[in-house]
Image (spheres, grey):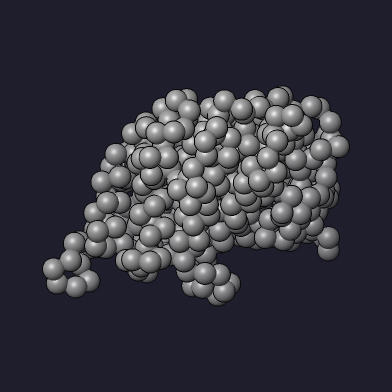
């Protein structure tokens, strides 16, 4: 994977250091660095040749790249015309036209270098119809993190760089998203008397890791909608994810039930049952009764029940050469989903459009965006599950992680690297 970082992009020191380490420790990634033409020394260095430096009448520019075999020269066709085009289109999009023109040559150089990722804050390059390879630093780290997890070769740490496997990355991400759950294992003696409760808490982490794995596969399938990689269809991955998320709350309910003075039957320990919610501690019940949390649990239930009731359909939409894989929902689940998405303020983010019903007499078909839907459900579910365990009267509170690299799963420099690789902001 070839990565070009916009030379005008201001990066924080941690991100800059991580990009440098990637070029050293991951041979599948090549970080290309812009230098002055006279300063090209090592593989990955490149220089940009402005049209004014080339004696031609067509306004071409060029790049000179150093590699293991010497230097490679590539042209930037009609670079001068493209600068003016960037100015005009940026003005039409309501962006800073002068900035678009001034930064156009660097963006064109990234294309000439056959970059897979162009890391930039250039608003014109990031516009949806301009450059497919342009990414913000956060999105670029998410793409790189996905690339590493697919290879089971994940770089973590800045001062003490280390390579960990995909399951380690998923485990680290799960416990950073569910710190209240992982805290119950630290001081369980005398406080966590039931092994069954520990097993259920561990099951919450396992279910979250499975949801994160399905999210990765969904992200890859969205990047390669032709299905050549052999991954499941988006609708199947949505179903797999919501089953895992439902498992998180099933395990949480049974873990809370185990700690009651008079526990209910395990089969009845479900947050969907009013009789079970009534016997829970007030602190837990107040969280469950919040309208947004009730809507979230209902969304997961509606989507999970499509396995037994109204199955997802498949769809795709092409615009400007880009194909987006979608999922469809109709019937009663679509009606319920539409209402719940509106309640959570996610209608535009989760739904693409409504189409005509597939059969006469049915509700209009709802077309969903699988990736943002699943990403939001994972984050919201982790927040709710963490709050429920934190509110339990017997819960231990997460202690600040010790500055020790012996436990890679809680060592902040490592967990922060993994978190960046999932495209999530630092805590």
Image quarter of residue 187: top right
- At x 81%, y 27%, the residue is 403
- At x 20%, y 61%, the residue is 364
The image position of residue 309, as x and y in percent, is 33, 66
Q: How many marks?
A: 0
Could you tell me if residue 317 is visible in this image? no
The image position of residue 142, as x and y in percent, is 60, 47
Horizontal side of 214 relative to 87 (left or right) equals right
The image position of residue 208, as x and y in percent, is 58, 49
Image quarter of residue 316: bottom left
Horizontal side of 190 relative to 92 (left or right) equals right
What is the quadrant of the C terminus in the image? Answer: top right
The one nearer the camera, 266 or 54, is 266
The one nearer the camera, 108 or 11, is 11
Return the residue found at the far front: 262
The one nearer the camera, 172 or 222, is 172
Rendered view: 47 above or below 236: above
The one nearer the camera, 36 or 409, is 409
What is the quadrant of the N terminus in the image? Answer: bottom right
The image position of residue 95, as x and y in percent, is 38, 37
- At x 24%, y 59%, the residue is 332
């Amino acid at each position: 994977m070839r990565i070009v970082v916009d030379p005008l992009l201001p990066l924080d020191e941690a991100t800059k250091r991580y990009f440098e380490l990637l070029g050293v420790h991951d041979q599948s990634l090549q970080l290309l660095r812009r230098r002055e033409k006279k300063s090209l020394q090592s593989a990955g260095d490149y220089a940009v040749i402005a049209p004014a430096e080339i004696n031609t009448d067509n306004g071409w520019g060029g790049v000179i790249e150093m590699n293991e075999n010497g230097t490679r020269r590539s042209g930037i066709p009609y670079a001068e015309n493209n600068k003016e085009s960037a100015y005009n289109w940026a003005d039409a999009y309501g962006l800073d036209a002068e900035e678009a023109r001034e930064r156009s040559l660097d963006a064109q150089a990234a294309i000439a270098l056959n970059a897979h990722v162009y890391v930039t804050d250039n608003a014109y390059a990031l516009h949806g119809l301009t450059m497919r390879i342009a990414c913000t630093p956060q999105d670029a780290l998410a793409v790189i993190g996905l690339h590493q997890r697919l290879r089971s070769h994940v770089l973590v740490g800045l001062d003490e760089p280390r390579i960990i496997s995909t399951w380690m990355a998923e485990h680290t991400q799960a416990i950073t998203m569910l710190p209240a759950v992982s805290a119950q294992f630290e001081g369980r003696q005398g406080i966590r008397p039931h092994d069954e409760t520990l097993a259920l808490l561990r099951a919450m982490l396992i279910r979250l890791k499975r949801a994160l794995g399905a999210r990765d596969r969904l992200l890859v399938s969205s990047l390669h909608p032709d299905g050549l990689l052999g991954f499941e269809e988006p609708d199947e991955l949505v179903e797999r994810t919501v089953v895992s998320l439902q498992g998180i709350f099933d395990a949480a309910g049974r873990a809370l039930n185990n700690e009651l003075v008079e526990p209910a039957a395990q089969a009845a320990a479900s947050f969907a049952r009013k009789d079970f919610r009534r016997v829970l501690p007030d602190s837990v019940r107040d969280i469950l009764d919040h309208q947004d949390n009730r809507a979230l649990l209902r969304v997961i239930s509606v989507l999970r029940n499509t396995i037994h009731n109204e199955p997802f359909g498949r769809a795709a939409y092409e615009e400007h050469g880009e194909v987006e894989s979608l999922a469809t929902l109709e019937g009663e689940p679509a009606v319920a989903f539409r209402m719940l998405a509106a309640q959570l303020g996610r209608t535009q983010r989760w739904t693409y459009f409504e189409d005509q019903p597939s059969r006469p007499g049915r509700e209009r078909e709802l077309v969903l965006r699988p990736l943002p839907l699943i990403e939001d459900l994972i984050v919201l579910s982790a927040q709710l599950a963490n709050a429920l365990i934190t509110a339990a009267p017997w819960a231990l509170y997460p202690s600040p992680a010790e500055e020790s690299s012996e436990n890679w799963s809680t060592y902040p420099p490592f967990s922060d690297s993994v978190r960046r690789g999932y495209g999530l902001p630092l805590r």
